[in-house]
Amino acid sequence: MGEIITGYGAARGSKSIGGGGRIQSAIESKGEESPKMPFFCNEELSLHYLERGQGEPLVLIHGLGCSGADWAFQVAALEKQFRVIVPDLPGSGHSPPPRSEYTIAGCASALWSLLDHLDVSRTNIIGFSLGGAVALEMAAQRPASVPRLGLINSLATYRTDDWRKWLEGSAADRAFSRDLH
């Protein structure tokens, strides 16, 4: 299955505790103890994540070039009502890169592995930018497991065959418009 390694910025097998970035700063400014941000590790991957609050699960997925720490202010507000789970995608934040290539489907599968380990069978998901693409793929992989899906600054599709169809349709529309004039 998997294991949890508690710490900040730890690589696989490490158990160090250190700085937690913006989430830690936001929590400290409220006068609370900083949460431990564990790693989920299995034979395929290692993911750094934050889990706060209780209630209905809510996964917040960051965008390209970002980390879960970008959700600090949202976590502070949402943890009062939800079980908020904020992963660092593979190769982002404190999560090491994937052992194989980077793919949207691979990121989605990695997050489902984490959620399976946390015994979360159904979750609401909000994704920002690249996180929206990962969220869409998670919903496509397990549609019955995602009751609500929120996309922020993301595309409705990221698959190349969908883009090709759109471009072909768009070119046909332009040609039709020229023929009318």
Image: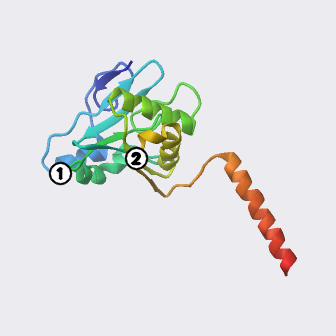
Total marks placed: 2
Residue wearing tag 1: 29
Residue occupying the point 15% across, 51% down: 30
Q: Pinpoint residue 168: horizontal percent, then vertical percent.
A: 77, 57
Residue occupying the point 40% across, 50% down: 148
4 and 109: which is toward the camera: 109
Q: Pinpoint residue 103: horizontal percent, then vertical percent.
A: 57, 36
Asked which secondary structure carries label 1, the reply is helix
Q: Pinpoint residue 137: horizontal percent, then vertical percent.
A: 53, 42
Residue occupying the point 47% across, 45% down: 135
Three-letter code for the amino acid on which mark 1 is drawn: Ser
Q: Which quadrant of the rendered structure holds the N terminus? A: top left
Q: Which quadrant of the rendered structure holds the C terminus? A: bottom right
Examine the rendered structure and indicate whether residue 24 appears above or below residue 1.
below
Three-letter code for the amino acid on which mark 2 is drawn: Pro
The extreme front residue here reads 144
Residue occupying the point 83% across, 69% down: 175
112 and 52: which is toward the camera: 112
